[in-house]
Amino acid sequence: MAYAHPVAKLGEIPPGGRKLVTVGKIQLGIFNVGGEFFAYRNICPHAGAPVCVGRISGTTLPSPVYEYAYGHEGCILRCPWHGWEFDLRTGEHLVDPETKLKRIDVKIDGEALEKFPVERAGDTLQVILPTAPPSDGP
Ligand code: FES
């Protein structure tokens, strides 16, 4: 049974904004990308950095040699440790699309940048977890 956890009020995270939340012992980043909400676990798949605090920007697009094109503004999350870039709309690493982020059960020590669905319930945003999150207490 899925577990819905309230994480923010509507309007609390404006377009281009983010909010870090802790559900049980799991830290997630909630992102508003052009009015659509995405949630990821705050662990970079490269070396475990708190990726959700990284800079949100665009990126250079594929282009011919000596031509530079910039795009996807506000859709790219750059890891603060080594600069790996992820598309906030898919969770995919930009350089290696084969390194796809899986929507998997929450693992406390998981290595993936996990993506969780965000749903709206009245004026509240909630993250849907596959199971109840582990808690701090007994
Ligand atoms: S830990 Fe994120 S790019 Fe290295």
Image (cartoon, rainbow, N blue to C red):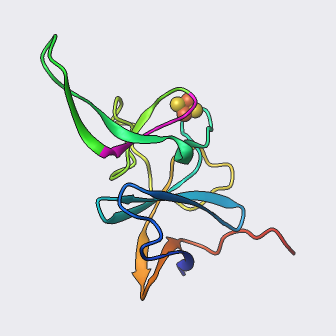
Looking at the figure, which quarter contains the N terminus? bottom right
Inspect this view and state whether residue 131 appears.
yes
| Residue pictured at 62% horizontal, 38% vertical | 48
Q: How far across and down, in percent of the image, does residue 7 sit?
A: 55, 72
| Residue pictured at 70% horizontal, 68% vertical | 24
Q: Is residue 13 magenta?
A: no
Inspect this view and state whether residue 112 appears.
no
In front of the other: 53 or 101: 53
| Residue pictured at 43% horizontal, 47% vertical | 101
Query: What residue span does the magenta drawing correspond to?
Result: 74-81
In this view, the residue farthest toward the bottom is 122
Question: Which quadrant of the structure image shows residue 87?
Answer: top left
Q: How far across and down, in percent of the image, does residue 105 sit?
A: 55, 62
| Residue 27 shown left or right of residue 17 in the figure | right
Q: How far across and down, in percent of the image, does residue 15 sit?
A: 35, 60
In front of the other: 62 or 104: 62
Residue 34 drawn above or below residue 80: below
State which image quarter holds ligand 1: top right
Q: How many numbered discs sit on the rendered protein? A: 0
Looking at the figure, which quarter contains the C terminus? bottom right
| Residue 34 shown left or right of residue 116 in the figure | left
| Residue 119 shown left or right of residue 80 in the figure | left
Q: How far across and down, in percent of the image, does residue 136 sit?
A: 81, 68
Residue 131 drawn above or below residue 72: below
In front of the other: 92 or 27: 27
In this view, the residue farthest toward the right is 138
Q: Main secondary structure of the magenta part?
A: strand
